Image: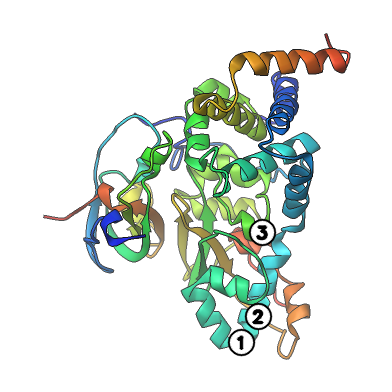
Amino acid sequence: MSTVPSDTAGYYRRMQSAVEELLILKGIVTPEEVQRQVDAMDTRNYKRGAKMVARAWCDPAYKARMLANGSAAAEELGLEVGPLKLIVVENTPSVHNVIVCTLCSCYPRMLLGIPPEWYKSRAYRSRVVREPRAVLAEFGTQLPEDVDIRVHDSTADMRYLVLPLRPGGTAGWNEERLAALVTRDSLIGVARLPDSK
Amino acid sequence: MGAAESVPVRFRVGDRVRVRRADPPGHLRTPWYCRGHVGTIERLCGAFANPEELAYNRPGLPAQPLYRVRFKATDLWPAYREHAGDVVEIEIFQHWLEELS
Amino acid sequence: MRSVHDMGGLEAGRCERDEHEYEQWEKRVDALMMLLSAKDRDLLKVDELRRNIESLGADAYDRMGYYERWMHSIVQTLIQRGVITIDELGRKLAEQDYRDGRG
């Protein structure tokens, strides 16, 4: 997708302003609601997913519940996710998971917020299902030869979170310290987490 | 969702299924690249209203069972010759799937 | 026929690590979509949003920015649903242009 600003940029900005004002005049939304929604989305970021990952690393029973029902597991930690139907896929020493929505940009927004621009790009959506290792390499990620890749195409009602492998050198760490290691890219699957020194 | 509003589940985990090669217009959630290919049912996700109908503000009922179907990368892509264990897993609605004869 | 948005498996360029902080208007487009599609309102279904984006045509689809496509699609859906009319939208745009010194 082009990064050159489109000549339509001004038009749609004006459109957003006009539509919002019309909907407010019609009593369909209030300005406060719109602002509340903007603020709510701003508070959603990958750290919510990191919290789940850290808990799963520390608590095998939680991990099992998370793999059975991702949304319920999120709610268990006080992470409100609304109607999200979350599937958590686990990285193991022999399996690496990576998430995409080839058809648009489906992403677990109610957990992690708005997806990064590259996730929505033509390059990522087209290529990661067909040449995942080449795409991962472009993100600086090399997988060992004996690891299988599972690419998950988010085509319908489910949304996905990758449970990354717990890095080495973290024995005895508390959840907060572990959560700080988790990156957004590892939750999408284009990155792995390096061992801790 | 009431039983009457949901199409009966046809497939079980492990079943081999083929994605139909249909090509209707409108809003479809079965990607082009998997049509005509054979995969394995990985799980049943539940039953959901049909997005093809929802896209036209119609109810999309009865709800269709939605599955995750696992495809081998070496089956999907002619050039994919290494890493025979790599897979692509896609959510596909039941009405796009047929059993292998 | 493969539609423009249905791009899985096609060849494409390098993945560039585009990240950007979204502008206020883009966040408000996102917010509007969430509010309109909420169950208690149901003035827009995510599926309608997607359909209207997918019918943009290959050139527009690739040229337009992400939230431009969304805004186009929200407008189309609201018109299709009869929530707003084309005339009142045109008048509101003109009124805002005048107010903001653009017209």
B29 over A86 or under it: above or below: above
Q: Does label 2 or label 3 sit earlier along the sequence?
A: 2
Q: Which chain hosts label 1?
A: A
> Residue A153 vs residue B47: left or right?
right
Confirm or deny contact between disc 3 and disc 1 (CB under 8 A).
no
Residue furthest to the right in view is: C101
Q: Judging from the image, what secondary structure is the residue with disc 1 in? A: loop
Q: Which chain hosts label 2?
A: A
Question: Residue at (51%, 61%) from the top-left corner?
Answer: A85
Question: Residue at (25%, 37%) from the top-left corner?
Answer: B22
Q: Residues within 10 Å of mark 2 (few under 14, many from 20)?
A: many
Confirm or deny contact between disc 2 and disc 3 (CB under 8 A).
no
Confirm or deny contact between disc 2 and disc 1 (CB under 8 A).
yes
Q: Which chain hosts label 3?
A: A
Dot 2 corresponds to which residue?
A55
Question: Residue at (69%, 20%) from the top-left corner?
Answer: A8
C48 over A37 or under it: above or below: above
When asked about the image quadrant of residue B48, the answer is: bottom left
Question: Residue at (57%, 74%) from the top-left corner?
Answer: A73
Label number found at residue A59: 1
> Residue B42 vs residue C22: left or right?
left
Tag 2 and tag 3 share a subunit: yes
Residue B96, given in percent of the width and then of the height, sits at 27, 47
Q: Is residue A126 visible?
A: yes
Q: Does label 3 or label 1 sit earlier along the sequence?
A: 1
> Residue A6 vs residue B52: left or right?
right
Q: Is residue A164 visible?
A: no
| Coloring scheme used | rainbow
Instruction: Name the amino acid type tagged 2.
Output: Arg
